[in-house]
């Protein structure tokens, strides 16, 4: 039996009639940009996250870029300032910093949870540090109470990169409600995925939200009047309507993901494969991906492929070793480099059937080098 990593067609099939109706509603309305669907989704998603405001944008990278840019325009950050960021994140987090002519300060993660280490964050703060970007990698919240305390004590902004953590919780709060602002991606593979690109920023800062609405729309609050330099990055009406449908079912899908992850954690018993660690209550992780570590990753991936199990690597090359960032190549980040060499993501999604889960578990247990 073939076990796909994630079948988007199967994932969307249960909602197909509602998705078609939502798209038809927009088509028939004749209003396709900055309309009622976006306003409704922004209200619903802000409420879901526990924040006052949501600003829909074109994609997750823009959500990060525009958050930093808006903070620069309202005087909280200046060109050349330093932003602390995890060393083992997806490159988009770094791109958002450098594209605003800010300096990324890469900090090693906790090797068990994959998330940024608060103690190392404290040691990395310097006179030009203005913000900490906490990435909730793979669906598990970063150590937000500790990072919040550091940010408040040092007068720093705390920004959540929540692209992989829709619905992740701690102490009754969801991702997006911990920092000064949070950036989300709605790429189709995300736990809350659109049928195309999409992103959003949530915040309870009214000034920031107001500026973001202008920045995403050419710097304009009133058509043809431009108060600041902006871009064209707006979550369109059809994607907003699609997301409104899927948001209703997000908690059910998270429950399915947690059940599969629990089965993996219980069933995979192989000393060659290190399982992910949940820092808090298992009910807090939303399992965007289930990432194991193996010193012989290529052999494991090849073996699983021979058993008809598709896997992916998130991510094979650390940002500081990418060609795009030659200036960072001299950094010594051994934890991040090891993780990028060893991580492997197993199939996980709401459409994975029990027999497929058992097939993955059996193959992992049987793997020998």
Image (tube, rainbow, N blue to C red):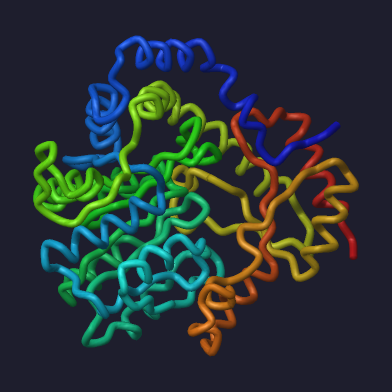
Residue 264 rendering spot, x and y as whole percentages: 68, 45
- The answer, for residue 46, to whether it is visible in the render is yes
Q: Which picture quadrant has residue 309?
A: top right
Kindly identify the residue that appears in the image at 28 percent across and 20 percent down.
31
* Residue displayed at 13% across by 55% down: 228
Question: Image check: 359 left or right of 36?
Answer: right
Above or below 330: residue 219? above
Q: Position of residue 278 (x, y in %)?
A: 51, 55
Viewer-nearest residue: 161 or 58 = 58
* Residue drawn at point x = 61 percent, y = 76 percent: 337
Front residue of 52 and 35:
35
- Residue placed most toward the observer, 264 or 9: 9
Percent from the top left, x then y, of residue 24? Answer: 41, 11
Residue 138 rendering spot, x and y as whole percentages: 52, 53
Q: Is residue 248 visible?
A: no
Left/right of residue 265 with respect to residue 221 in the rendered view: right
Quarter placement of the C terminus: bottom right
> Which quadrant is the N terminus positioned in?
top right
Describe residue 120's horizontal placement relative to residue 258 as left or right: left
- Above or below, 215 relative to 339: above
Q: Residue furthest front?
A: 224
What number of labels is visible? 0
| Residue 95 placement, left or right of 147 | right
């Amino acid at each position: 039996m073939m076990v796909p990593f994630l079948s988007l067609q199967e994932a969307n099939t249960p909602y197909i009639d509602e998705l078609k109706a939502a798209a038809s509603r927009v088509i028939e309305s004749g209003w396709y940009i900055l309309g009622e669907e976006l306003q409704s989704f922004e209200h619903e998603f802000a409420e879901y996250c526990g924040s006052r405001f949501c600003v829909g944008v074109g994609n997750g990278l823009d959500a990060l870029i525009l958050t930093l840019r808006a903070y620069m325009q309202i005087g909280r950050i200046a060109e050349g300032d330093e932003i602390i960021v995890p060393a083992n994140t997806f490159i988009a987090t770094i791109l958002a910093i450098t594209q605003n002519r800010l300096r990324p300060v890469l900090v090693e993660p906790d090797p068990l949870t994959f998330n940024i280490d608060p103690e190392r964050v404290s040691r990395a703060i310097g006179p030009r540090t203005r913000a900490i970007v906490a990435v909730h990698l793979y669906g598990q919240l970063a150590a937000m109470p500790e990072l919040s305390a550091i940010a408040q004590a040092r007068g720093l902004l705390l920004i959540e990169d929540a692209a992989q953590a829709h619905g992740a919780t701690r102490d009754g709060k969801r991702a997006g409600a911990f920092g000064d602002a949070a950036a989300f991606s709605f790429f189709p593979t995300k736990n809350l995925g659109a049928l195309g690109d999409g992103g959003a920023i949530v915040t309870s800062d009214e000034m920031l939200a107001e500026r973001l609405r202008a920045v995403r729309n050419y710097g304009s609050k009133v058509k043809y009047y431009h108060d600041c330099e902006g871009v064209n990055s707006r979550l369109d009406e059809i994607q907003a309507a699609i997301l409104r449908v899927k948001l209703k079912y997000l908690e059910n899908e998270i429950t399915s993901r947690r059940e599969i992850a629990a089965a993996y954690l219980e069933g995979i018993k192989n000393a060659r494969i290190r399982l992910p660690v949940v820092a808090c209550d298992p009910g807090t992780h939303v399992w965007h991906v289930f990432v194991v570590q193996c010193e012989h990753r290529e052999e494991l991936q090849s073996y699983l492929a021979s058993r008809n199990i598709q896997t992916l690597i998130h991510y094979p090359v650390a940002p500081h070793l990418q060609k795009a960032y030659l200036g960072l190549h001299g950094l010594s980040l051994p934890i991040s480099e090891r993780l990028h060499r060893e991580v492997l993501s197993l199939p996980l999604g709401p459409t994975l059937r029990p027999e497929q889960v058992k097939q993955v578990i059996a193959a992992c247990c049987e793997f020998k080098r």
